[in-house]
Image (cartoon, coloured by chain):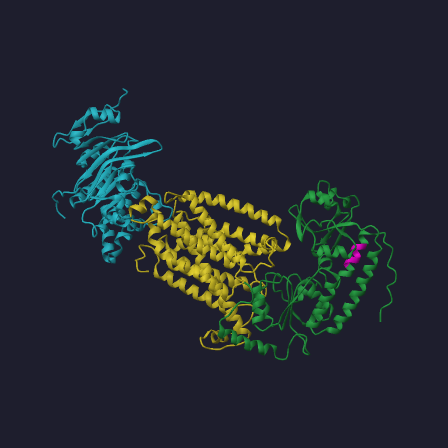
Amino acid sequence: MTERPPSPEPLLAARDLAYATGGRRLVDGVSLEARPGSLQAIVGPNGAGKSTLLKLLSGELAPTQGTVAYAGEAVAAIPPWRLAALRAVLPQAAHLAFPFTAAEVARIGLDGIGRGLGRRDRAGILAEALARADATHLGARAYPTLSGGEQARVQFARVLCQLAAGRTLAPAQVLLLDEPTASLDLRHQGALLDAARDLTRRGTAVIAILHDLNLAAAYADALIVLEAGRLVANGPPAAVMRDDLIARVFGVSWPVGRVPEGGQPFLLPRRTVAG
Amino acid sequence: MTGPHRLSPSRRAVFAGAFACALAGRPAGAATPATRIASLGGAVTEILWRLGAGPRVAIVDTTSVYPAEVLRERPNAGYLRALSAEGLLSVGPDLVLAAEGAGPPAVLALLREAGVPVETIREPPTAEGVRDKIATIGRLAGLDAPAEALSREVEARFATLARQRARVARPARALVVLSQTGGRLMAGGRGSTADGILALAGLVNAADGLEGFKPITDEALVAAAPDAVVMMITEGRSPDPATVFAPGTALAQTPAAARRALVAMDGLALLGFGPRTPEAAGALMRAVYPDLPPDPPPAPPRE
Amino acid sequence: MSDAAGPGRPGAPVFLGLGLLLAVAVLLSLGLGAVRIPPARIVAILTPGAAEAGRDALVVLGIRLPRTLLGLMVGAGLAVSGALMQGLFRNPLSDPALVGVSAGSGLAAAAVIVLGDRLLAGMGLPGPLPYAALPVAAFLGGLGATLGLYRIATRAGRTSVATLLLAGIALGALSGALTGLLVYASDDRQLRDLTFWSLGSLGGATWTKVWATAPALLPVLVLVPFLGRGLNALVLGEAEAFHLGVPVERLKRLAILLVAVAVGAGVAASGVIGFVGLVVPHALRLVIGPDHRRLLPASALLGGAFLVLADVAARLVVAPAELPIGIVTAFVGAPVFLWLLLGKPRQDD
């Protein structure tokens, strides 16, 4: 699929989301949108409510206030099987109690939505997803024996399978990623985000929680900055990454630099204590 | 299941035919007595052997422990209340004499369905019960004459026993202990076979606060204050009074302990209510009442 | 199975093998027993339309056949329940007993055995208690316990599997204590009845039992394969399963209900038979992998075959008496399981 013109209805729209539990507001008054072909990164310090926000967006948690809608339809009204065709979620970690092989784990992404597909189509989707996630060679290995990074790639393959299968039911989809690069080495961090960017070229909207600001700056069209459950900034990296905001939200006084070509900002760590 | 299990109608017709064939010329107690008897229940087996029908018994159960060679020489269909239907059928029985309580009911129903006559032998724990048992078994096995003779013999002994009982001035209290597993004493209360044998031996059942064979608490035991304790001989070994009345046990605090009054007897003889019952009761009586004068000669036979 | 087995997993040959094993088990069960019947006779008796009469026909059609059918159903039900529980709790050590079925059934049965006649006397009704009271009570006890556990573990429509597990353990302990009280209060005969019941037996199998048990077990066996996909997704986690479109709460509810019915009916029909629910799915997983779409039907096949074979052994070893089948399943199952564990490379560390 080629670039799509912006459609009137965003793929995913959240308005005034709030989530409170045990007397604490984990998310407070957050509104955001995801349009086809965009890649947005949710960033913020620990405890800022990033994971909670992602769970609200995916429909896993019901907000105490506000709405989440997929293509205009409230998420609570969409039955789980159809929601699975509209959006896929890559979890932070998945511990398996049973020794499925990597290929079997990836294939689980196909088994629900992809029920109607033919065996050859399914095999093709599986192979492509494994290749994209650089997990083909892991296919026959038992998932519990893989390293954290390898497991993360297999889960990514699963998610790709789910999206591919759902594409037959929903033309435009949303991909939600919860710290997908946490256990990956540099090469695979880049590869995964490259693959995510690839998906956006097909019209998928991607929202990823990233802890690495430099990665976010390199890949994301927009940064969504959360602090204590509130949205404090939402815009392109060049606009959002400023010394004062970084200092206030993240509590470090590292200067923001700029790469000469393209002006992509970067953040270099700086030792605060001499010696 | 209540009642015999139901097969489909066509099958029942088939088995009715089998039934008829099996019974042709062999109603219970008729001229051609059963030659392959399934004897289920310790007293039932003992009586059959006493009547000389041992060779005609094809299969027994685990409670058929007397005479001792029975379990060695005959196939065993399992525990009385958990019998095997196919096992019983495998010896081709033509008569099943089952003590009441044999089961499961489905198995007995299956035997009936196979055309094998199944007769339940009631076991009331009394002298009359023994007499009726002998008569019933004799009739069903086609051995009325031997049964009559055995009955008379047993009756005479019961009569002697009754006379001896009459001479007991002050009945003593006794407790029958069935088992002592895990510190828990199982005693024979009202209506149990223990109760029956104690009555025959002229003894008061110290555990008459219980019904049937029940565990008895230490306190109840002390309150029962038995003058004698009766226990079973297991595996040929008698319980040792030193252990039974060891200091610290509840039994040690009974009048029985002071006199080391422990009577050990064979379980089936004592509680089975079969032909050895009069002797067992007599032995029990003599053990508890050692000072009882010896038997006067029996009354002349009433003929 | 319509789906490819996936790399490295034996597929159709395993099912063929299991089917063959099942057939062999049935043949042995119908052909062997305390009564010697030549195979030709057995074939003649089993031929539909033949009006065979006599003891042999009764043994084959009235004893061995219902026993075989009951063994197949109960074995399949127990094994499938074990697989369901292991998938639901995401733990290969789970056992159907965890949802409280066995505890409830056991307690109800013990109550009937020990208190039954006393209750009747107390109500002024003539004894003895009808024999059907025991299986009915066991079934209802199992269902009741499971329902209670489910209620405890479910808040606002969400069933917490962790709470279910913990509450199940508590219920098991409580029920064990109450059963212990009943044992303590039982007399000699009741104690023996309880002991035999808790060792399990197919000995009382009659056509009545078969017809009574089938409506409970057959629907379970038919419905269970449909849970395969959902259980696979559930292995990834409840949230992940939801993201993949699985109706998680409904799946949990259905799984718990099916287990309660299958195990309840099994226990009611043949007492407590342990080990099948834990070991059969676990052993199969080592051979055909953890994909529930294949594991569930395979468990049914192997569970049925295993129980029937165990019954054959129970009937032959001390013929003409019978061993309680619970002893045989443990005695045979444990070494086989150990052998499997030792033989396979560890896959899950």
**Which of C101 and B48 lies nearest the eye of the viewer?**
C101
Q: Which of the 4 image quadrants contains residue B108? A: bottom right
Chain B colour in the picture: green
The residue positioned 58% from the left and 58% from the top of the image is C129
The residue positioned 25% from the left and 56% from the top of the image is A116
Q: Is residue B19 left or right of residue B201?
A: left
Is residue B73 found inside the magenta-colored segment of the image?
no
Q: Is residue B104 left or right of residue B241?
A: left
Rendering coords of residue B23 (x, y %) = 61, 77
Rendered view: A131 above or below B163: above
Q: Residue furthest front?
A: C124
Rendering coords of residue C76 (x, y %) = 44, 59
Chain C colour in the picture: yellow
Is residue B282 found inside the magenta-colored segment of the image?
yes
Is residue C238 something that shows in the picture?
yes
Number of marks in the rendered image? 0
**Which of A61 and C315 lies nearest the eye of the viewer?**
A61
Q: Magenta stretch?
A: B280-285
Q: Quadrant of the N terminus of chain B?
A: bottom right
Chain A colour in the picture: cyan
**Which of C167 and B88 lies nearest the eye of the viewer?**
C167
Rendering coords of residue C138 (x, y %) = 51, 55
Is residue A190 something that shows in the picture?
no
The residue positioned 25% from the left and 51% from the top of the image is A126
